Amino acid sequence: MSYLVLARRYRPLTFKEVVGQTHVVKTLINALKQGKLSHALLFSGIKGTGKTTVARIVAKALNCENLIDGYEPCNECQHCKEINKGIYVDVIEIDAASNRGIDQIRELIDNLKFAPAKGKAKVYIIDEAHMLTKEASNALLKSLEEPPPHVYFILATTEPNRLLPTILSRCQRYDFRRLDLPLIIKHLKSICEKENYEIEDKALELIAKEAQGSLRDALSLLDQAMAYGTKSKEDVINAFGWHEAILIEEIARILLEKDLKGALEFSKKIYEQGIDLIYFMEKLTEFFRELIAIKAFSKESQVSFQDITLKELLFEYEFEEILLIFQSLLKDLEIIRKSNYPQLQFELSLVKICEYQKLVPLKDIIEKLEQISHINSSFIGGTHLEAPKSWQDFLNFLHKEAPVLHTIASSFPEPEIKSNEIYLNLTHIDNTKISLYLQEIKERIEDYFKKPVKIEIKEKKKITLDEVKERPEVKAILKSFSAKISYIQPIKE
Ligand SMILES: [Zn+2]
């Protein structure tokens, strides 16, 4: 007998054996017990999470002769056995992605009216349902609307958003989730025990991580690992060529965390391992380019992370911080290529990045400045000091008189108080609430200062680095912290 892959050898035959997906299984069991199962089911979720497997169990539950507890197939009767073998005439599996898919849908529709040949229910399992052509979808739609009482449809798809909305609305939807890492590890472990295959827990963990929530992927990796005869974590890393990916993630974390000691140890380690440093540096630079893309577009990344916590770690860092590391690596890559001492250059490159100060978003600095300027309002500049009543006086006054108006007015930039007029330059009016109260605030100012107020609303303008540098409070901060400005981040509204 030829070798049967693990995923097939250990395919769950009952609801109880299904790994994970407890929410789906529970709902299906309840519906079956009450005889209220919908005639059109949609199973959605990433590959290898059990959609087709559960569809077959449902098909058995609908046809089994000795149903246990009203929902669990016996796997002993003729019906169950034939469904397990895939030769049961009333359970029809259609692969919508194949060329035959369309013909099969037509055939299906023609045959709907006939009663099941053997069992109680005809079950159509349509895999990759999002691949159905528009024509086939429309034909299927009519059948989904009013399926004969003996007919059930189970549509399985990895991309439910590509199905026609009319199809979606006619199906009861079940979402199959990615499997948790510990669950996959536990399952792999139990299979290894059954197979009498000894392998380190750490090795299984690595395989489970790579599978990214797909049990089928995890099992096929385990198949390969067994074929290679791998036992330890190192075996697995070597057999699958994951060495480089793991090293890159390790150093990426060190650089993000600015761990100088870690960087030096790492540099030594990879030198001793005889890794081609130029090639490694290229890969590392590419990796940071990917991190930037992930950070900038918060997109589902194509990169598969060995270390899932690294992906989470990304959210703790500012975009500019990752960008700086990328820029630095890119620059040093060129230098390393030409250098006679690539190892020293590589080490220097890592150290340089670790020596960057952790960046503080400008927003935080401005917040601190505002606190300072409240303590000493003359710090900001002097124009209003000539006026007998200051803007701050007005705000204090408004605070007692009209707290809501005060909240809004204190978000305004300080107006220019001249001898005969007051200029209020607003850069933008960010919501209707402010514009509603603006007239009232204007009147209050005029009343308080006994001067007319002119309001000008300007388009929001981008601040340049030079302008920021010129501001006296920024100058003072830069001086007293002996800091430099690395980037400017506009305050988010
Ligand atoms: Zn049975």
Image (tube, rainbow, N blue to C red):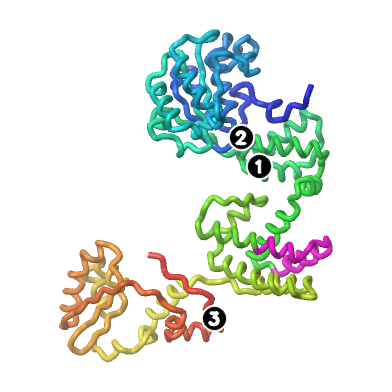
Q: Which residue, given by chain and number where applicable, does mark 1 sit on?
A: 211
Tell me the kind of residue under disc 1.
Ala
Residue 272 picture quarter: bottom right
**Please, is residue 308 above or below residue 84 in the view?**
below
Residue pointed to by mark 3: 484
Q: How many marks?
A: 3
* Image location (x, y in percent) of residue 188: 71, 35
Which label's residue is closer to the chain start, 1 or 3?
1
**Is residue 124 depicted above or below 211 in this figure?**
above
- In the structure shown, which secondary structural element does the residue marked by tag 3 occupy? loop
Residue nearer the viewer, 385 or 298: 298
Q: Which residues are magenta?
A: 260-285
> What residue is rendered at 46% in x and 13% in y?
150
- Residue at label 2? 48
- The span from disc 2 to disc 3 (Cα, nearest Å) is 51 Å
Location of residue 317 in the rendering, given as x and y in whole percent from the top left corner: 56, 63
Mark 2–mark 1 distance (CA, rounded to whole Å): 10 Å
Where residue 479 appears, as percent x and y from the top left, is 52, 86
Q: Please provide percent x and percent y for residue 486.
A: 54, 76
The picture quadrant where one finds residue 263 is: bottom right
| Disc 2 and disc 1 in contact, CB within 8 angstroms | yes
Helix or strand or loop: what does disc 1 sit on? helix
**First reached walking from the N terminus: tag 2 or tag 1:** 2
| Quadrant for the C terminus in the image | bottom left
